[in-house]
Image: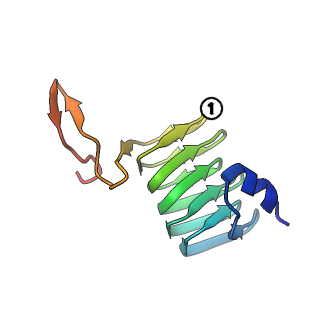
Amino acid sequence: MFGKDKEEKKTGAAVAGFIGKGMAIEGHLSFEETVRIDGSFKGEISATGTLVIGDSGHVEGEIAAGSAIITGTVKGNLSATTKVELRRPAKFTGDIKTPTLIIDEGVVFDGSCVMVKKENTPYETVQYGEAKREDPIAQ
């Protein structure tokens, strides 16, 4: 039902919640497992699980998730504790903070990315030959 088996093969997890194509929701969404958005969502998402935004999905707002797999459109900032995958034909406008970022060829990414360790601290960066710790998101 609703392509649940197909999605489980793609993400490795069963979909616990679904916002279908043609649906529009505004507010705050929180979850612990996997949620797929193929419709429109505007607001704040806070999750420990996996957020999947399908080809027809459109999300506008601040996102914090365990991991995210995006093929749709996102406008806003995204913080993920595990990884972010931007798969073609995704369009992402905003900043990403994650330990692992995967971007397919053909994806539109307009923003910046800060790679963090699993403990949510920035990696040490080298600027002009000197090691320096900085957190561009905090600036």
Q: Is residue 79 above or below residue 42?
A: above
Colour mapping used in the image: rainbow
Considering only vertical position in the picture, is 19 above or below 79? below
- Label 1 sits on residue: 106
95 is higher (above) or lower (below) than 131: below
Q: Among all residues in the image, which is located at the extreme top?
A: 129
Crowd class of label 1 (few under 14; some 14 to 19; many from 20; radius 10 Å): few
Q: Secondary structure at mark 1?
A: loop
Across and down, in percent, residue 49 comes to 55, 64
Residue 121: x and y in percent read 28, 51
- Classify residue 120 as left or right of residue 92: left
- Is 115 placed left or right of 19 in the picture? left
Image quadrant containing the N terminus? bottom right
**34 or 111, which is in the foreground?**
34
Q: Residue at x 21, y 44 (%)?
A: 134
Residue 66 place in picture, x, y as percent:
49, 60
User: Which residue is located at x 72 percent, y 53 percent?
Assistant: 56
Q: Quadrant of residue 20?
A: bottom right
Picture quadrant where residue 24 is located: bottom right
Identify the residue shown where x is 49% and y is 47%: 93
Identify the amino acid type marked 1. Gly
